[in-house]
Amino acid sequence: MDSNNTTEWRDNKSLHECMMYMLQNEIMCDVTLRVGDERTLIKAHRFMLSSRSAVFHTMFDGSLPEKGDITIPDIDEITFLDILKYFYSDDITITNNNVKEMLYAADKYMLAAVKRECETVLKQTAQSEHATKALQTGYQYHLSDLQKESLDYIEMNTNACLLSEHAVSLSKDCLELILKSDYLDCTETDICQFILKWGKHQCELAKLEPSGGNIREALGNILYMIRFPNVMMKFFSEEVAGSFLLTSDEMVSIYRSHFGVISKTFSCGLRAPVSKRQTYTVNRYEQITGPMRTAGIQSLIFLSNKEIWLKGVNIFLPYVQHDQHVRRGRREMCGTPGTVNISIKVLNDSKEEKIQQHEQINIAPYNGEVRQIDFSKPVRVTLMRDYTIVIDGMTHQIYYGTNCQESVTDQQSGVTIKFKDSSVDESGTNINTGQFAGLLFSV
């Protein structure tokens, strides 16, 4: 390096710019890393690696510190350089193309912030027909939120997910997580058909004949999570009975179950998809009045004492003054007809958007005071965690609730919803008054 420029790279530079310069130009580096299959040499600073990762700290300053070059064969060069960039600058870029590799590296070196970024990217996959792949990744790397997001989607879109190319590659543990659910939105025949496909794939991987006995061996105790009494008799007789997947006694118990004899081996309980479960409503207001001015966002926080599925919201409609009178034998109403376009969002306690829905509201005096808005998909609400519901775009005065209750219990479901003021609100909605007449949910 030119001695006349030894200080130029420091001038007017931030800390991370200086650190990156030292890394890239190998200034005062004191450790050599041999990375990837090619054992590419990468130089770095023990101090920086130890400051960002407890794994490296133990490696360099533990009871048996590493003194020579460090070999890292299980992470490719590009991924490791991205991780180094994060170590030195706090800058990290996660995409669908590198998320798997970055997640592995983040897990290996205990980088919690990087794992969270990976999980955010993977959640996009969780809300698609590839949710089984996201479930497997979440389980492998102990990402509980990703597992829950994936299972939510699988439960509501079971057939599409089981038809995904990734589904037959599910581990036994992840398959068990799915079959535990009472909420799968498909028939038990669909599940049985997939299980046979999954079992045959496991036999192929193990280079075994896909016989009933080998499939049973691959399934293990998962076999007893299939609700065979609910499988269509024709499919059971043609595809299962002759495969030797089940013992003679097990088959007899299933046939007898079709004639009213309850099987002691296999459950006959029907799965109840969220879309088909009973919907309950809690209303928080005692009286309705109007008008209430709206000047922006209306928002309220709610939490539930049980895990529920939020299916919709009752909102107060635009307030239209009118006079009713009869002219020429017909009733006429004088008002301000038109429409208003609003958006409704639900955010979790991490401010992640769980759903956003757009609605067109007619403005007319005969519309009533309250409108039920059904969500396009249910939103799983975890117990005792704050969720925020937001309405934006309501440009007209509205009806509103008064003497609102801070806590409302639905006696039939036993669910208690508690409300809190939201700092996001701009229009006067709070726990005592304002927008949001009630919530619709299932348990």
Image (cartoon, rainbow, N blue to C red):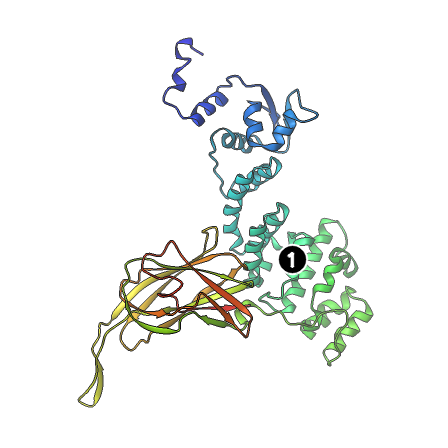
Measured from the top left, where is residue 150 in percent x and y?
56, 55
Q: Is residue 343 left or right of residue 180?
A: left
Q: Which structural element holds mark 1?
A: helix
Q: Say whether residue 42 is visible.
A: no
Q: Residue at x 22, y 75 (%)?
A: 335
Residue ranking furthest to the left:
328
Against 234, residue 294 (above or below) is above
Q: Position of residue 132 (x, y in %)?
A: 59, 54
Closer to us: 198 or 45: 45
Q: Quadrant of residue 151?
A: bottom right
Residue position marked by numbered label 1 in the rendering: 177
In the drawing, does residue 331 fall left or right of residue 247? left
Residue 434: image location, x then y, percent:
35, 65
> Residue 363 vs residue 268: left or right?
left
Give the total number of marks visible in the rendering: 1
Quadrant in the picture for the N terminus: top left
- State whether residue 436 is above or below residue 119: below
Res 251 visible: yes
| Outermost residue toward the bottom in this view | 329
Q: Position of residue 56 (x, y in %)?
A: 61, 29
Name the foreground residue: 24 vs 281: 281
Q: Quadrant of residue 391?
A: bottom left
Q: Residue furthest top?
A: 3
- Amino acid type of disc 1? Leu
Occupied quadrant, residue 8:
top left
In the picture, which quadrant includes the C terminus?
Answer: bottom right
Report the residue at 65% width, 57% height from top: 177
Left or right of 253: which side holds 352?
left
Q: Residues within 10 Å of mark 1 (few under 14, many from 20)?
A: some
Residue sitting at the far right: 248
